[in-house]
Image (cartoon, rainbow, N blue to C red):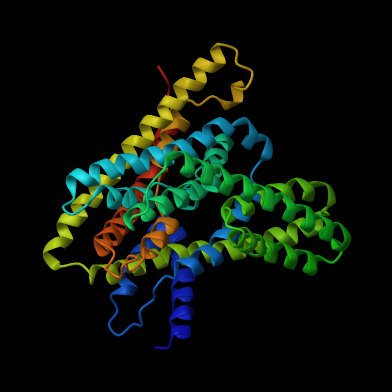
Amino acid sequence: MENYSVVIFILAVMIGLSAIADKIKLPYPVLLIIAGMAVGFIPDLPAVTLNPEIVFLIFLPPLLYDAAFNISFKEFKININTIGTLSITLVFLTASGIAVVSHYMIPGMTWPLSFVLGAILSATDAVAAMSITKGLGLSHKTNTILEGESLVNDASALVAYRFAVAAVTGAAFVFWRAALDFGILMIGGALVGMVMAKILGYIIARIHNNAMVTISFMLLMPFVTYLIAEHLHVSGVIAVVILGLGISRFSRTIFPNSLKQQSKSFWDVIIFLLNGLIFILIGIQFPYVVRNIASDQIWPYVGYGFIITVIALVLRMSRVFLQKKNLQRAFAKGKHRVVEGALLDFKNSLIISWSGMRGIVSLAIAIGLPLKLADGSPFPERNAIIFISVVVVLFTLIGQGLSLPWLVKKLEDYKPT
């Protein structure tokens, strides 16, 4: 089977299974992942490998742009404290917690390698959470926090990953330099996003009567923005997020209703296809990474992956409920930055905690680990890190993915005492 035939085959499977998932009331991301694993074991099927650069370029810009474009800027601003806590503080806390556990639990995991694994698994994939909870009637606040987290946490995880890999290759870690680089990446990305939003806004203001050209520009600009930011060595993720937020505010005053409807229909199809491909590709990767692991190591590594999944979940729950208390304390003291709408209750705190699935970004940066170090020697424990990362992604997406709808339904009947 030729490569292009494999792509068409995967798309057909994805679309068919998405329809079946609605009929059997199973979250379609879970069904697609399981199907992807089955497809990966088909004999003589050409290898479907993920190129991390292609994943970041093809998947991230449109998904981030769409989420930023549709998010409520008012709600985003109200919940910025919680969003910042989850997307920055929690990312580095999770990376450190996983690193400590990995170092003492997994043979051969030096401190630098442990931090590489921690960085890979530090960011959650709210795309998965939103796909699974779609139609479950989550509060607007919960949706905004989950989407807002996903808009920023990828940038934090990529920065942590970059410095962890540098430590493995022998580069010295200097905290102030890492903090400075992080600030430059974030601020630089934001500036690029603002400039590109101004440019796109200027263009759209003059062509918005031509629906097809306007939608085409809006489709192209996230990719252009991402590439420009990455070329300037700043965060392409943040640049695309700022672009989406800026055009969202601009579109409310300039877009006619007919254009809004056409644009929404077009983007709905694009996002549906990209989301489906993400989940089925995650499943397909599992059979390939299994082949790179010695048979007697598979089950121990699966066990390590399960323990890391539990640790990541405990850290997330602890930080979310601590944030809930901190917000209540700040509001009680009358701090003007915390309004009543920013407070978290038990229900949305638990749902946000349980929505910490890992996804395509973790998988892509794991597979993108260097093959060799600067001296030409193989990257140590590379196969083990990739395998454990895939196992954690599968545990979170399948385990939490199957139980999240049940949890949301149970919480509908919850009455605080």
**For residue 81, above or below residue 299:** above
> 351 or 20, which is in the foreground?
351
Specify the quadrant that holds the N terminus: bottom left
Percent across and percent down for residue 281 are 41, 67
Percent across and percent down for residue 287 are 28, 70
Residue drawn at x 24%, y 42% is 101
Percent across and percent down for residue 368 are 40, 65
**For residue 146, above or below residue 45:** above
Percent across and percent down for residue 415 are 43, 23
> 96 or 396, which is in the foreground?
96
Specify the quadrant that holds the C terminus: top left
Res 408 visible: no
**For residue 37, above or below residue 134:** below
Task: Determine which quarter of the picture holds residue 89.
Answer: top left
Horizontally, is 58 left or right of 280 in the view? Answer: right
**For residue 16, above or below residue 398:** below
Residue drawn at x 84%, y 61% is 208
Task: Determine which quarter of the picture holds residue 359.
Answer: bottom left
